[in-house]
Image (cartoon, grey):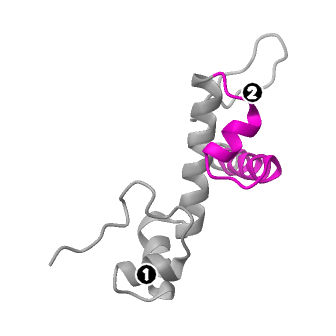
Amino acid sequence: MVLPSASEPGALDGKTDHDLGARLFVSARHLRRLFLQHLGVTPDQLARSSRTYFARRLLEDTDLTIEEITFAAGFGSVRQLNRSTASSERAIRLAMSGREARPSDERTGNQMLGRWW
């Protein structure tokens, strides 16, 4: 018997925790608990982060419009993409705030977080 993998590309896209849990023969609650314990995020947060990363790659590597990128990355609207991007950037800032040395922009003196994607 071959068990399905949660790490298959797109395994979390467009599916609920219940759907993924059923594929893996565990409850949605237990699945969320395992994701939090081992990855520090819920399945939904991981899927959203993956879509945001993919959208950023498309922004950098293609000439697609923002609307095309939004839907190609699996977001329902540009507003959802913007909200997800802002949320990711906030998390990065919080994670970086505890670090001591960060490069700064010589022109403005502002500290730079750099590219994380």
Where, by quadrant of the figure, is residue 111 drawn? Answer: top right
The front one of 117 and 94 is 117
The amino acid sitting under disc 1 is Gly
Q: Which mark is residue 108?
A: none
Q: Which mark is residue 21?
A: 1
Q: Residues within 10 Å of mark 1 (few under 14, many from 20)?
A: some
| Residue 98 in sight here | no
Q: Position of residue 83 (x, y in %)?
A: 79, 52
As drawn, is 95 to the left or to the right of 26?
right
Judged from this view, the residue extending furthest toward the top is: 107
Q: Judging from the image, what secondary structure is the residue with disc 1 in?
A: helix
Q: Position of residue 4 (x, y in %)?
A: 29, 71
Residues shaded magenta: 63-92
Residue topped by disc 2: 111
> CB atoms at circles 2 and 1 under 8 Å apart?
no
**Magenta includes 19?**
no
